[in-house]
Amino acid sequence: MNDRIKQLATEAKLLTGWPVGHVEYQRFAELMTTEFIGLLEYEIELCEQYKATSFNDFDRRWHEGKIVHFRRMIDKTKDHFGVE
């Protein structure tokens, strides 16, 4: 388990040593989903920067396509996991 997952598990109170229940696992799932969406949003920001500094139309369209794809992934993730 990497350090970030350990941090999220601790925040969700999964590593307390006490018996854990549905609430803790639900909180962990919410934190993981939010973390994943945050990564996709970061990639969108990078692609927007690359698109703004592109030298030709092909590169701009390439980065725009990636932005659209990442936004679709965010929407699908929110729909799949019921995130607002």
Image (spheres, grey):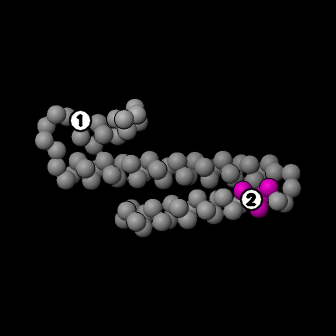
Measure the C-alpha gap from mark 2 to mark 1. 43 Å
Where 67 sits versus 15, above or below? below
Point out residue 68 in the picture as x, y percentages from the top left corner.
63, 63
Q: Viewer-proximal residue, 18 or 84?
A: 18
Q: In this figure, which residue is indicated by the disc labeled 1?
A: 15
Image-based side of 27 in relation to 43, left or right: left
Counting other residues with Cα less than 10 Å from the Cα at mark 1, is it few (<14), some (14-19), or many (20 or more)?
some
Image-based side of 13 in relation to 60, left or right: left
Point out residue 42 in the picture as x, y percentages from the top left corner.
58, 47
Q: Quadrant of residue 83?
A: bottom left
Give the residue drawn at x 35%, y 40%: 8
On whether residue 51 falls in the magenta region, the answer is no
Q: Residue furthest right?
A: 56
Give the residue drawn at x 30%, y 40%: 9
Q: Give the magenta part as a residue range.
A: 59-63
What SS does tag 1 mark?
Answer: loop
Of the image marks 2 and 1, the number of the one nearer the N terminus? 1
Point out residue 67 in the picture as x, y percentages from the top left corner.
64, 59
Residue 52 showing in the rendered view:
yes
Give the residue drawn at x 34%, y 53%: 30
Q: In this figure, which residue is indicated by the disc labeled 2?
A: 62
Q: Which mark is residue 35?
A: none
Q: Viewer-proximal residue, 61 or 1?
A: 1
State the quadrant of the C terminus. bottom left
Residue 84 showing in the rendered view:
no
Image-based side of 75 in relation to 29, left or right: right
Q: Hey, what amino acid is under mark 1?
A: Leu
Image-based side of 52 in relation to 24, left or right: right
What SS does tag 2 mark?
Answer: helix
State the quadrant of the N terminus. top left
Q: Hey, what amino acid is under mark 2?
A: Trp
Counting other residues with Cα less than 10 Å from the Cα at mark 2, is it few (<14), some (14-19), or many (20 or more)?
some
